[in-house]
Amino acid sequence: MTTGTARAAEPGAVSDRTALEAKRASLIERLSSLDSLVIAYSGGVDSAYLACAASLAMPGRLLAVTADSASYPRRHREIAEQISSQFQFPHEFVQTAELERPEYRANPANRCYYCKTELYGHLARLASARGFAAIADGSNADDRGDYRPGRQAAREFGVISPLDEVGLTKTEIRALARDLGLPTWDEPASACLSSRIPYHSEVTGEKLRTIERAETALRALGFRVFRVRHHEDRGDGTGAASMVARLELARDEMARALTPDVNAAIVRELKAAGYRYVSLDLQGYRTGSLNEGLLLRPA
C-alpha cells in the first residue's frame, strides 16, 4: 500500500514527447484491435481520456458507462455527462447497489473489492446482453504499486486496463488529455465518498450525504485539492456519536483556510452539513491516508 502528499499536476514535466507519442500510438492500436468495448467511466481524467481515445480509435463500437449511487459525488456524474456530450461518445448511467451489500457497508480494508464487484457485475451483464466484446477500466501504470483491492474484482471479471497495458502514467495521461482539449485534464484526483470513512466504521447513506455536502461547501469556498475525512467521537459520556470532520487540504491552500473570514466560513458550512467538530490535519492532503490505519489494524 502507498500513501503520498498531493502534488500539483505537471503535464509539462513530460520531457520525452517522442516516448509519450509512442505510448499514445500503442493505445490507439490496442483499442483498434478490439471488436467493441464497454468502458467503466467515472468522469475522472483517466477514464475520460480512455473514452475519448476509444471514440477516435473505434468509433461506433464503444459505450461509456457511469455508476450512479450514493457512493459517487453528483459532481462526478455531471462531469462525466459534460465530457461525453462535448466529445460525442455514447454514454449511459447504471444504478449500482453496493450500499445494499453487508460486506460493503461493514467497510473492511478490501471494501473497494465489493464496490467494483457490484459495478463490473452490471457491466458484464450489459456487455453480454448487447454483444460488447470487452470491458475496460481507467487504471494506469501508477496504480500498480498502490493498495487497490478493486483490481482483484477487475481480474475476476476479465476487465482490461489499456492505459496500464501501454505504460501510461498519470502525468502522461494528463498531458495527452490536455493535448486533446479535455477540460478536466488537471482535475484533482478523486475517489468514491466511502473512501473518506475509516475502515471498519460502517458506511451509511447518511454519512455519504454529509461528506458530499461538506466537500461541496469547501469547493464553493474556492478550495481545490482536499478531502473531508469522516470520524466519530463518543467521548462526551452520553454514548451518542458526534461527527468530526478532519480536513486534509493541499499545503498551498492551508494558509488561506486559517485566515479569520475563511476559517469562520469553513466551520459554519461544515457544521451546517452536520459536523459537530471541524479539525485541520496539519499533514495536509495525501492520497490514501486512511490506508495508514492498516499498518496498525489487520483487515
Image (tube, grey):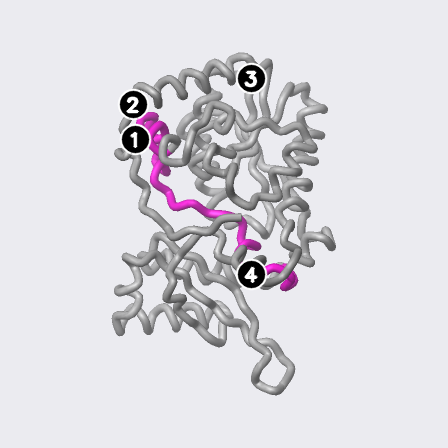
Q: CA distance from mark 3 to mark 4?
A: 43 Å
Label 4 crowd (10 A; few <14 / some 14-19 / many >=20): few
Amino acid bearing label 3: Arg
Where residue 121 appears, as percent x and y from the top left, is 70, 35
> Tag 4's secondary structure?
helix
Where residue 247 appears, as percent x and y from the top left, is 42, 64
Please name the predominant secondary structure of the magenta segment in the image. Answer: loop
In-front residue for pair 107/152: 152
Q: Are marks 3 and 4 in contact (CB under 8 Å)?
A: no
Query: What residue is pinned by disc 2?
Result: 17
Q: Which residues are magenta?
A: 174-203
Q: CA distance from mark 3 to mark 2?
A: 29 Å
Q: Are marks 2 and 1 in contact (CB under 8 Å)?
A: yes
Label 2 crowd (10 A; few <14 / some 14-19 / many >=20): few
> Tag on residue 14?
1
> Tag on residue 61?
3
> Tag on residue 293?
4
> Tag on residue 219?
none
Amino acid bearing label 4: Gly
Q: Earlier in the sequence, mark 3 or mark 2?
A: 2
Q: CA distance from mark 2 to mark 4?
A: 39 Å
